[in-house]
Image (cartoon, coloured by chain):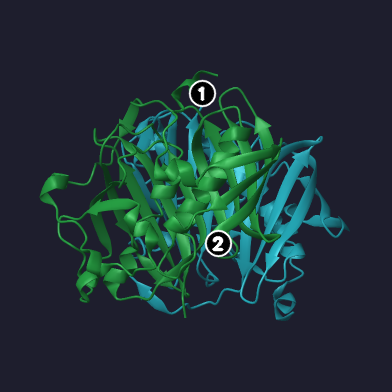
Chain colours: A cyan, B green
Amino acid sequence: MTWEARMTTTTSEFDADTEVEQLSEDHYRARLSERWCNPTGATNGGYLLGVCLRALQARLPFPDPLAVSAFYLRPGLPGSAELNTELVRAGRRMATGEVRLAQGGKEVIRVVSTFSELTERPDGKELGSMPQLPPPEECPAQPDAARAPETTMAGRIEYRYPSLPGWMSGNPSGRSTDAFWMRFADGRDADPLSLPSLVDSAAPVIFDLGMPGSSTVELTAHLRARPAPGWLACKVSTQHMTGGYHEEDFEIWDSTGVLVAQSRQLAIFLE
Amino acid sequence: MTWEARMTTTTSEFDADTEVEQLSEDHYRARLSERWCNPTGATNGGYLLGVCLRALQARLPFPDPLAVSAFYLRPGLPGSAELNTELVRAGRRMATGEVRLAQGGKEVIRVVSTFSELTERPDGKELGSMPQLPPPEECPAQPDAARAPETTMAGRIEYRYPSLPGWMSGNPSGRSTDAFWMRFADGRDADPLSLPSLVDSAAPVIFDLGMPGSSTVELTAHLRARPAPGWLACKVSTQHMTGGYHEEDFEIWDSTGVLVAQSRQLAIFLE
């Protein structure tokens, strides 16, 4: 297994907090950390997904998530969690598995994912383009005052916006798309395992449309490449806020201009 | 169950060919028809998904798919198929289930879906817009000569393009997005159950980029409304053909200008 050589002994926050303990071939245990909470006090959906993918990575014969779909069934909370995995199909180029994370016997999130082995510089034809952003060091950081103290995950991720979204100062700007830089605050570089978490780690763009918060029903992420080290350029947009739901599309481009992940989630507006 | 009143006794092709026979609470049987085959002779992925959702609809306490994710594991072929369903969680406003379709004991497609009850005219804020198309009767139909005889599903669906894609006459036009009308050829109106099939029922736009065919790895569809009767306005686009994969985004707007479904699939290029 060549990919085992890539696994490091780092104790980054993300790696420490997504650790899973294998109890049997398909059964894992994890402790959800209180360091990745949303303003509601529930654990962030991207973080929950990261824990699930750690278990699947241990179970499947390929290292990198290629396609991931997560259904959010109940809020996750800091504390212990049980994970059940299933190897659905292993082929020559990819393998598909399922994982169900439960707390207190109740299923919180169900994830199906196809894993493969990604390269750093995929060839092909790219018609899209990286968001045009000033260098991260020229972009202001989000002021601490804009964060609710319950939002512990804001301390795990750093963002750099060319201009801060209006909602952070109480004046939603009406923008339905935005672009910014993102990275782990502790300096851990992004990798395929963490990208599906990162696509759900920024404040939703609907805040800048003056809309209330929302809760993810389903999130899909498709990965294309192993990200190069450094800041990630992100593009987020929402177009359709109808029927009580909205989508959020998210792209992550690495520092060399390669699209590494794109995602879409469907979320239900909180009443 | 108010929604049962809506189910009709129609014998449309789609309804007849997606019929499932319930053997026990979670176990169903179907016969995949030879009327929905791709150029390869395999059953179309959208049609497979339709059969799966028929079983889930029978199993879940809500009538309409809201969020659907399908992982394609092996090609489906005309003939008998077994379906196993699972009620994952039923709440007050939505319910989530899973269904696995197998042929000869081998799993072909795994689907997780949240069902709810959709309305015809959802309120909210729509920032997108319906594709601007001439009326369907002013658009040319696809000539029969452009279809491979194996592509039986081309007889199930009608398309009307404002101008026919170049690949149909052997000259890919280089377009990465396209818009056109679509409907069932036998006059059956689209409903939420058939929309996840319809998003995967048109020729891929990559043909107009001169790219080879591809095979779906994962497809996600999000639904917003029950479509009004009549033609459906569709928008398709592909931006990222990298690493051996491409995405295809698909939108369906009903005849009154309501976005009823959006989807994205990740597909692997055939070598």
Tell me the subunit letter for badge 2.
Answer: B
The residue singled out by tag 1 in the image is B4
The circle drawn on residue B76 is: 2
From the viewer's perspective, is residue A228 above or below residue B47?
below
B222 lies left or right of A148 = left
Q: Residue at x 44, y 46 (%)?
A: B196
Q: Residue A243 in the image: x percent, y percent?
A: 40, 28
Residue closer to the observer: A132 or A124: A124
Camera sees residue A184? no
B55 lies left or right of A1 = left
Residue closer to the observer: A92 or A268: A92
Q: Residues within 10 Å of mark 1 (few under 14, many from 20)?
A: few
Residue closer to the observer: B1 or A255: B1
Q: Residue at x 69, y 59 (%)?
A: A97
Q: Residue furthest top?
A: B2
In the structure shown, which secondary structural element does the residue marked by tag 1 occupy?
helix
Tell me the subunit letter for badge 1.
Answer: B
Q: Residue A31 in the image: x percent, y percent?
A: 80, 46
Residue closer to the observer: B16 or B236: B16
Q: Tell me how far mark 2 sits from mark 1, CA to CA.
A: 30 Å
Amino acid at pointer 2: Gly
Pick whichever of labels 2 and 1 is earlier in the sequence. Answer: 1
Q: Residue A1 in the image: x percent, y percent?
A: 74, 79
Amino acid at pointer 1: Glu
In the structure shown, which secondary structural element does the residue marked by tag 2 occupy?
loop
